[in-house]
Amino acid sequence: MRTIVAHKLTQRFGSDFALDAVDLTLDPGEHLAVLGENGAGKTTLLRILATAARPTSGSLEIFGLDALRERKELRARIGFVAHAPGLYPALSSTENLEFFCSLQGIERARVPETLALVGLTDVARRPAGRLSRGEQQRLAIGRAVLHDPQLLVLDEPDASLDSGGSDLLVKVMHGRSAVLATHDHALANRLCQRTLVLRSGRSLDGQTRLQVVR
Amino acid sequence: MTRALVVALAVARKDLTSEWRTRELVPALGQFVVLALVIANFGFQIDSRNASTIAPGVLWLALVFAGLVAFGRAFAAEREQASLEAMLLTPASPTAIFAGKALAAALLLIACEAVLLPALALFFGTPLNAALVVAVLVATIGMAALGCLFAAMVARVRAREVLLPLLTLPLWIPFVIAGGQAVQVAMGARGGYNQALGLLVDFDILFVVLTSLAARFVLDD
């Protein structure tokens, strides 16, 4: 069974098409890079795949389930890193993750190992609001993998990450299906087997990464 | 404990911990209600004869406007931090998340009431008794449910500061009417306290059930 099967996903905001009939498939364990200029529709596509938004039309199956109807079941199996970290600044890194353990219905014992995975053990007790932007991004990535999801949806996760950031992404994406939006073609080459290029909400099938860069 | 209760308590604990550490809301609300009482004290010619007539109105005015601020912040802060979406993208029930937010906002308003009621007794010389406290607490439950629902609805709108009172105040009127009567009786006026309190409980049940049903649609889409 394929991880994602999307057919003619369309998202309109008024008369503007943020996504225009995009088809997409993803196999288990496969990593897909979504490339495109600003405003190409990458974030809209990723938000739909993460069940954070509903498309105007089209169909979407994730793990064989209708992603528009069975969202609650899917959310336990998807990890999403959005543009903004979405952390609680007054809570420590540990408390942020423990809170999401309660929401996910998982044991808090996962928190120390997750903090170690994203390299935040030393700042585990520091309030999230006092972490650097890169550390906040690491914590957001930690939150996305806290419940051991089978599918990761990552919207420019490399933003604000330091030079070790791509190694961290390799670690968290290992053994999972992943869709990654990025402007960094080198990172896409390193992490992903396939590429989907978007321009003005449309998929540019058949173009190589080199053509896209040009 | 059921899963929904665990989620609701976790959300409430998270909000209260954040407020305890930042102290953004409660001190400001406490100052607001004291200032409102000071202004009312100078604005009205208060004496021992009219204090029990004027004080309930002043109490509900201060409470309603403090409530608008408290419930408005409940979801506005989540939107500003972009953290609401992260919560909603978990398998946790949106209704449980809403219940936790409403519980925390209600407890913050109760903290504000802990300043308001003694200050009212001090400025207006009105009695501070169990009947008064119970009437205000019972009204707070339904007001919190409604206030949080509308706060969630308008949180994504730019003009939320204007829209929240426009949507919330008309539906808070039943609480002000029944609560006003209960408070007047608790302060010494004649009337049926139990009848007013019963009406408040009915409104609580009605609005808690309705907002719980609506919360899923408001939060999830």
Image: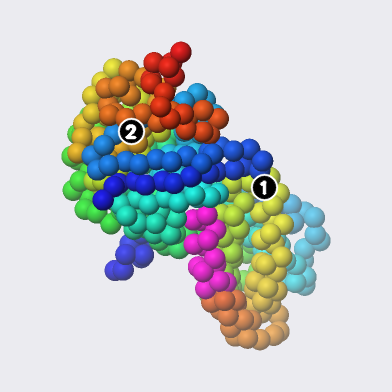
Examine the structure image and report whether residue A140 is included in the region drawn in magenta. Answer: no
- Which of the two marks, 1 or 2, is nearer to us in this view? 2
As helix, strand or loop, the secondary structure at mark 1 comes to helix
Q: Which three-letter amino acid code belongs to the residue tagged 2?
A: Leu
Question: A133 above or below A13?
Answer: above
Mark 2 falls within which chain? A
Instruction: Categorize mark 2 by other alpha carbons within 10 Å: few (<14), some (14-19), many (20+).
Output: many
Q: Amino acid at mark 1?
A: Glu
Q: Magenta residues, as a range?
A: B207-221
- Within-10-Å neighbours for mark 1: few <14, some 14–19, many 20+: some
**Residue B4 seen by the camera:** yes
* Residue of label 2: A32
Foreground residue among B152 and A34: A34
**Which residue is found at the position 42% from the left and 50% from the top?**
A60
At x 38%, y 21%, the residue is A208
Tell me the SS state at disc 2: strand
List the residue tagged with mark 1.
B161
Question: In the image, residue B120 lies at what x, y percent?
Answer: 64, 62
Residue A140: percent from the left, percent from the top?
Answer: 35, 36
